[in-house]
Amino acid sequence: MTILSFTLVLLAGAFLAGLLGSLTGLGGGVVIIPLLTLVFHVDIRYAIGTALIASIATSSGSASAYVKEGITNIRLGMFLEIATTTGAVVGALIAVFIPTNVVAIIFGCVLIFSALMSFRKKSEAVSDEDVSKLARDLKLNGTYPSGGEVVSYKVRHVPGGYFMMTFAGVMSGLLGIGSGALKVLAMDNIMRIPFKVSTTTSNFMIGVTAAASAVVYLQRGYISPGLCMPVVLGVLLGAFGGSRLLVKANAKWLRIVFGVVITFLALQMIYNGLNGKL
């Protein structure tokens, strides 16, 4: 395969990854890394470095729209970024010292978790019970627009959410993904904030978390411009297309298709990791 044909095939694969990631809200990294390692046989550390750069690009592009609409809780996102950034640096430092097949097995397990999260029923229930003194002192409670009205909500269980965000950061640095599923789980299930605010705030945070991890990979020489260029371009175009399709698409069937594809890729990653092929 020539360099030009490799670049074009990679561009098409990244477009599909961005499209699926945008439609399901899980980001493109969960597809990009299996694509690079299983199809193109790229070293998993270079695949992770490429996925991190793609995460920064997609997060920067899409998060600005949600911030403008007033849905994202910027103060909460910046507070939790302390946890995710710390965890991301730790995860990236661990990743360069452990065997690649172990990284592949862990990544496969996280993929299965992400697939299960995609089938999870989402709730828009809002907690207005002001029971967290820490959230009140840090001014983390907020409001968001919904159906022409402004809905207020209260943040709960701040320490539990902070701990979960640290774990999400470690997984992001270790595996090169945005850890969107873990971040949404922390904000939606533990901190009890509305799902729409959870997803948009998670999207806002992904780029910053990925940037912290990418510094470590860049220093270690695991970020290749030849891989990053077509992947970033493809994922951006796919994410843009996905945001346009999302309005008309059947979200239920999209999540089923995505979950089946991700589960298949996860089993492939685990199998190859156990057999030392990655």
Image (cartoon, rainbow, N blue to C red):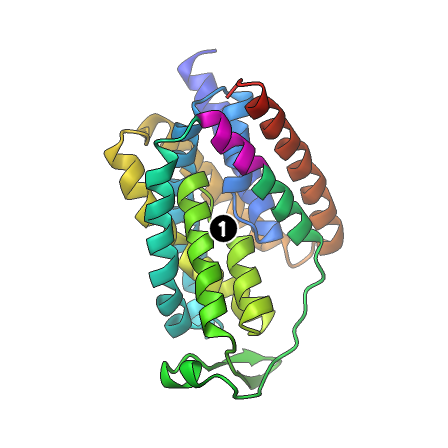
Please identify the quarter of the rendering in which residue 266 is found: top right
**In the image, which residues are magenta?**
100-108
Whole-percent x and y of residue 194?
58, 73
Q: Nearer the viewer, residue 53 or 86?
A: 86
Q: Is residue 59 above or below residue 200?
A: above
Residue 101 on the magenta segment? yes
Q: Could you say which is closer to the camera, residue 40 or residue 116?
A: 116
Say if residue 19 shows up in the picture.
Answer: yes
Residue lying at 60% horizontally and 29% vertically, measured from the top left: 270
Q: Is residue 214 left or right of residue 143?
A: left
Residue highlighted by disc 1: 179
Residue located at (54% from left, 29% from top): 35
Q: Which residue is depicted at the point 66% across and 77% down?
A: 125
Q: Quadrant of residue 46?
A: top left
Q: Residue at x 45, y 59 (%)?
A: 165
Residue 202 versus residue 174 in the image, above or below: below
Q: Is-magenta flag for residue 133? A: no
* Amino acid type shown at disc 1: Ser
- 165 over 111 or under it: above or below: below
